[in-house]
Amino acid sequence: MSQSAVIQSDVASAFSVRSDRIFYRGNNQIYAIVGNNPEKGVVSDVWFDRFDDQADFRAVLNHIADLFEKGGYRYWLADLRFMTSDFMESEAWLVSDLMPRVIAAGLRREAVVLPDAAVKVEGADAFAAASRALQDIADGRVRGFTDIALAKAWLFDGALPE
């Protein structure tokens, strides 16, 4: 089983999501998979290695925003544990376009699963290193985790680990 299949299986089993759309780089390598579970109101994105450019990054997140805008979704799991690309060039776009769209469409919480080294405390604000504006827009509804089970507990119950 490929690494992308194992990682997607990890998220799929924890959140009961099914694959909605697969995103490919120019060389036909998968760089992201978006999944969803309309019954639970959850959308997930799982990232692998790197994307070719910021347009690729934005294509995935625009697709997620479109799903939220179609209605019925309240929770978002972003699994960035294996993403190696930097998306800092898209920070202004995240602040001015993406997050306001998703929040207006009904986002209650987003759990971002990050590599171990990126999270000092489970449940910490995922945008702590980002701009103050993005932190203000996210309004505490976006939290970072290294553990899928803790991310799931917070995402659906709002309970932070002690």
Image (spheres, grey):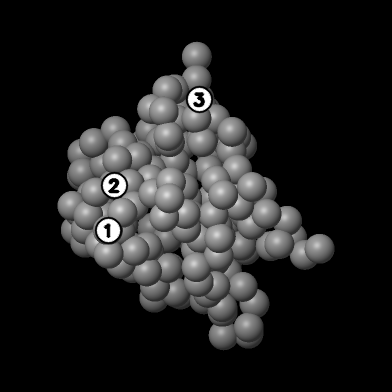
Image height of 26 relative to 112, above or below:
below
Q: Which residue is mark 3?
A: 121
Going from the N terminus, do you reach mark 3 or mark 2 first?
2
Relative horizontal placement of residue 14, taking residue 140 as reference (left or right): right
Q: Which residue is mark 2?
A: 107
Residue at left offset 24%, top offset 49%: 106
Cβ–Cβ under 8 Å for marks 1 and 2: no
- Residue 89 % position (x, y): 35, 63
Residue lying at the far top in this picture: please name it. 162
Query: Badge 3, how many Cα within 10 Å: few under 14, some, many 20+?
Result: few
Q: Which residue is mark 1?
A: 71
In-front residue for pair 157/98? 157
Query: Badge 1, how many Cα within 10 Å: few under 14, some, many 20+?
Result: few
Give the CA separation, mark 1 to mark 2: 10 Å
Residue at left offset 34%, top offset 52%: 73
Residue at left offset 31%, top offset 54%: 72
Q: Is residue 39 visible?
A: yes
Relative horizontal placement of residue 64, taking residue 15 as reference (left or right): left
Name the amino acid, label 3: Val
Going from the N terminus, do you reach mark 1 or mark 2 first?
1
In-front residue for pair 115/155? 155
- Residue 46 % position (x, y): 55, 57
Circle 3 or circle 2, nearest the eye: 2
Going from the N terminus, do you reach mark 3 or mark 1 first?
1
Name the amino acid, label 1: Gly
Which of the 4 image quadrants contains residue 129? Answer: top left
Circle 3 or circle 1, nearest the eye: 1
Which of the 4 image quadrants contains residue 88? Answer: bottom left
Q: Secondary structure at mark 2?
A: loop
